[in-house]
Amino acid sequence: MTGMLRVSEIFRSIQGESTHAGCPCIFVRLAGCNLRCRWCDTAYAFGGGREMTVAEVVAEVERYPCPLVEVTGGEPLLQPDAIPLMRELLRRGRRVLLETGGSLPIEGVPDGVLRIVDVKCPGSGETASNRWENLESLRPGDEVKFVIAGRDDYF
C-alpha cells in the first residue's frame, strides 16, 4: 500500500444519490478532474488537495465505523492509485462505490466495486467526453447516472 493519492477530503455523511441514498457513507474525494460540467457542485476538487499514501487514506477511513465507502472526485480514475485503494478497502471488508464521470475506462476497477458511471447529457457541456464503451463494460449491480439540467437532456 505504498501508492500516492491527491485527496481533497475524507468525511462521513449520508449518501444522497444512487441506490444507497439515505445510507451512512464515508466519502473519499480525490482531487483533479478532466471535465468541467456546467453544473458541477465540487469544482473545489479540481485542484489542491493533500498528498496521502493509500495506507494513510485507508487508516483515515478506518476511523469511521461505517461499512459503506464511496471513492469520488473530481474524477477518481485520473489517479492510478485509486485502483489499489479500492482493492484494499474491499480486502478490509468495506462495501465500495466508485463514482466516475464516465470519460475514462472502467474495465480496471476491481470486481466487487459498484461502479456508478455518469453519462454526460447536453446540459453538462461535456457530452463529447462520454466514453460509450463503458456502458458495454457494466456489470450486474453497477449503476448509470444522468444529471438532467434541462429539457434538452431528455434526448
Image (cartoon, rainbow, N blue to C red):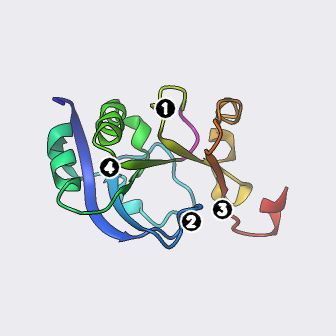
Q: Residues within 10 Å of mark 3 (few under 14, many from 20)?
A: some
Mark nearer the viewer, 3 or 2: 3
Q: Which residues are magenta?
A: 101-105
Marks 3 and 1, the one that precedes in the sequence: 1
Q: CA distance from mark 4 to mark 1?
A: 24 Å
Q: Residues within 10 Å of mark 2 (few under 14, many from 20)?
A: few
Q: Is residue 2 above or below residue 97?
A: above
The residue carrying mark 1 is 111
Where, quadrant-wise, is the N terminus in this rendering? top left
| Residue with the most extreme right position | 155
The answer to whether residue 77 is magenta is: no
* Residue at 30% from the left image edge and 51% from the top image edge: 47
Marks 4 and 3, the one that precedes in the sequence: 4
The residue carrying mark 4 is 31
In the foreground, 84 or 34: 84
Contact between marks 3 and 1 (CB within 8 A): the answer is no
Mark nearer the viewer, 4 or 2: 4
In the foreground, 113 or 49: 113
In the picture, the disc for residue 147 is 3
As shown in the figure, which amino acid type bears the numbered disc 2?
Trp
